[in-house]
Image: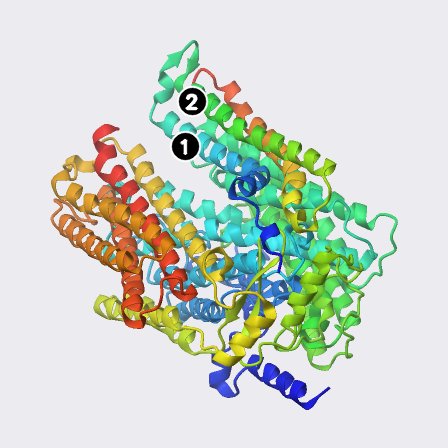
Amino acid sequence: MNTQTAELSPPRMFRRWFAFLGGGCAWTYHLLTIYVIGEFGCVSGFDRHVYAGISAVAWLLIIASVIALVPAIAATWIGYVDARRDAREEENPYEEGGRYLSSFGWPLNAVFTMIIFVESLPVFGYLGGC
Amino acid sequence: MNPSAEKNRQRFTRTWQTPPGIAGWIAEVNNRPLGIRYMVTSLAFFLVAVVLAMVMRTQLAVPDNNLLTPDTYNRVFTMHGSTMLYLFAVPFIEGLGLYLIPLFIGSRDVAFPRFTNFGYWMYLFGGLTMYASIFTGQVPDAGWTAYTPLSGPRFSDMGLDFWLLGLSMVEIGGIGAAVEIVVTILKLRTPGMGIQHMPILVWSYLAAGVMILFGFTPLLLATLLLELERSLGFRFFDVHAGGNSLLWQHLFWFFGHPEVYIIFLPATGVLSTIIPVLTGRRLVAYNLVIVAIMVTAFVSFGLWTHHMFTAGLPDLPMLFFTAASFMIALASGIQVFAWIATFWGSRPPYTVPMLFILGFFFVFVNGGLTGVMVATMPFDWQVHDTNFVVAHFHHVLIGGAVFPFLAGMYHWLPKFSGRLAGEKCGRIGFGLIFIGFNFTFVPMYIIGLLGMRRRVFTYPEELGVGTLNFISTLGAYSLGSGFAVVLLGLIWSAWRGRLAADNPWNGATLEWSTPSPPHASGFQRPPVARDRYPLWLEPPQDALQSELTRAADGLDHRPVSWRATLVTDVTNGIPQAVQYLPGSTLLPFFTAVAILGVFISVLLKNFIAAIALTLLVLGLFGRWLTIDPDLPREEADAFAERMQLPLLSSGTRTVGWWGMLGMIAILFTVLAALIYGYFYLRLYSDEWPQMGLPLPGLAGSLPAYGLLVASGVVQFFNMRARMRGDRRFLLRGMAAVVILGAAFTSGELWNLANMPFSPKTNAYGSIFFTLNGFVLLTVLAGVLLMGGALMRMLLLEEPVDTPRLQLWLQNSELFWFFAVAAGLVAFVTTYLAPRIL
């Protein structure tokens, strides 16, 4: 049984799965973080601290959103690059599933990137405080 | 066929058959009979809930009605909602999944057959516990959401304890079934079924299964916390002792919103399966539909606070949830348009499933649009807690789930029973349901906008909603009658309907390649599947096909004296190993009975009996874990030679390893929810610790946690010793871990016993003890696991690389690393954070 060809090296397997799930994981981090910063920051009065006209809570939310966008965009890009490389290479039926992770993953991650961006927008209506 | 081969086939058939008699029925582990059992039980609960709904609507038919007292009405709507959401919707989905998923993926059974049996009994006992409250005259009355303080000890009677404990049992069964489904889909797919070839139904169940793991666990924790408050005087939610009622709402809705998508996603999978069969075409935009499923699965966890828009939380964080709520509507829209595109230009037959699908489009889209409305804060502030919301969620749940599932019942009845469902009865039933539904719930939008609140037992005539309520009640009678007609029709058809062919609809997926109903083993020879629609396409004839066919042929009516299925890799569906599957046993049933005993003891406040029965439960679980596969040596060797695959393996090639990963995911979620609860209570307290309590001392805790960290370091070296097969080092190292773990447990117990406060002092005390108690229990469980592995090594004297031992060691390792990490997080949270933040 030719199982070896189905078992990619760990770094390559990680890259494929990151290209598939990276956006979703980035979104999860983003939503939970902005919720915690939002409720905990606003209730504790942390928004009273203002820097360059923007409250500390708003700054944290912006930073958290930028941090979330990085892996989401990276997962989209890696998936796209890998999908294009796979399209140029000869088909390997033993690795079809892995290729699918990349070719399917990048549109999925693009959607998550868009969602992260949209969910970040409300902060711009509350830059001065909660 | 030669006599020897025929004899083997008969032995193979016998191996998969259920043992006879009542004991055999109780001990059943095959997924299909248990799936049927889940579905039948859930439909029975469904009918009870429908009757309760009729009673409610009769009370609301006219203004100022006094058919029911306010108290009775509260109990009726509580049981209606609880039954529909906890005892019907998810168990039905799980039953359908347990039946269909192995057939869809070409597996002979699910990953943990004994756990399927256990899960069913837990579900049944949990549901019966909830309803047993009737015999005490104290039926639960706090709604299916059981908000505190209404559900707390001050305002609710014993009925809530029945509710909490019954629900906990149902949740345990549900979470177990989810682990089954996820691991089965990831590891037991038939040769060739890579991730790109998984049918949409399988994707939807995979998503729902993972969602259950992370979504149900907070509710399980919340119900246990509330029961601790009610039975033992903890103060998590008691505002007079520093607790916070909103903490319950957060924990509840973190479950509650994903719950509705857990119900919805498999229903969409059903539609995505039936529509191609009706149209004779492949589903349009398969990839986009999976995008929609994945987006829904993730984003559904980011909506929960939209149920709390009127709770007084700050506007800014609420807006994030509004944005997320809008985004998830896009995902649902993608699926709807994919289905419409699949239908476009085709001429599907207007059979009963088609009627229910059309009904789904009308009702669900209506409900989805009103969902976007209530996701907008200012609008929600007006309609929250009115009948508008009741109308919305019935549209999305009945339209989005019940209609597709009824379509599915008609579609798959031939597979379940070998008989076709009667069309006439189905059409009559559909007509009654569709007309009844719209007359029941469309007026409710108007009633709600006119100001009638929900969960009120009557309303004054001056409100001017009497006529609309009357129409709604008539609609409800039609709806209830329709459900009765449909279900009775299905029962009749299953018993006396026309005999069905194996594939009466020319379906494309693997379940239609089996007889109707399937053999006890499901697949006597696993199929090879290299397409999303394997029955519609001939596979390519290449080297991979030959290899996969060889693996499948190896399992053709084999093995004959034990149960087995193939394990394939997660991504590409390439065979990796043969998985032994246990046969029928009464152990799961006795374990469920013992757990029921624990919960009844808690209900009766007999905590000594509860502790004794808990020890029995641990013993029974330990017995499960220590039963080794009993493979006849000669047959096993010949089989392994033929298959060229390991029969017993370890690591990621076994379902056991993945099951441990699932267990850790559950425990991680509990830990995360407890940490969240700690900081949430901290956030809304003026001082921390509350009420001037002293900070917990480090003098006792530092040494104890130091021992725990040391055990983690030792375990790291144990892991390396396992990898190189160093038995001597392992024995000493594992003994050291057991000793260090036991020492930590004793030390921290002594610490907690000497704290200047107790769990009943205030909310701070409650969360402090609960969080540290969770760590103690986790470490104790780790000590037992590690001790068990050590005993095995000492008693059996197996080489370290024996697969079964390796699996034990790997699983114990994983668990121990989690326990140490959990301990560190709890230590930082409870001992260090109050000193810094």
Between A43 and B91, the residue placed more toward the observer is B91
Marks 2/1: CA–CA distance: 11 Å
Q: Is residue B589 left or right of residue B324?
A: left
Figure quadrant of residue A102? top right
Residue with the mark numbered 2: A60
Could you tell me the amino acid type at mark 1? Val
**Which residue sits furthest bottom?**
B3
Instruction: Examine the rendered structure and indicate whether residue B220 appears above or below residue B294.
Output: below
Q: Is residue B632 left or right of residue B358?
A: left
Which element type, helix, strand or loop, lies under badge 1? Answer: helix
Q: Residue at x 64, y 77 (%)?
A: B557
Residue B206 is tagged as none
Between B782 and B254, the residue placed more toward the observer is B782
Instruction: Examine the rendered structure and indicate whether residue B209 appears above or below residue B642.
Output: above
Which element type, helix, strand or loop, lies under badge 2? Answer: helix
Figure quadrant of residue A76? top right
Q: Is residue B275 left or right of residue A18?
A: right
**Which residue sits furthest top?**
A52
- State which tag comes first along the sequence, 2 or 1: 1
Between B430 and B168, the residue placed more toward the observer is B168
Q: Split into 4 quadrants, where in the image is the C terminus of chain B?
A: top left
Q: Give the class, few, some or many, for how many residues have Cα within 10 Å of label 2's Cα (few <14, many ≥20).
A: some
Q: Give the class, few, some or many, for how many residues have Cα within 10 Å of label 1's Cα (few <14, many ≥20).
A: some
Using the image, name the chain to which the residue with label 1 belongs.
Answer: A
Residue A36 is tagged as 1
Report the colour scheme.
rainbow
x and y percentages locating residue B702 in the rendered image = 17, 41
Using the image, name the chain to which the residue with label 2 belongs.
Answer: A
Could you tell me the amino acid type at mark 2? Leu
x and y percentages locating residue B212 in the rendered image = 50, 53
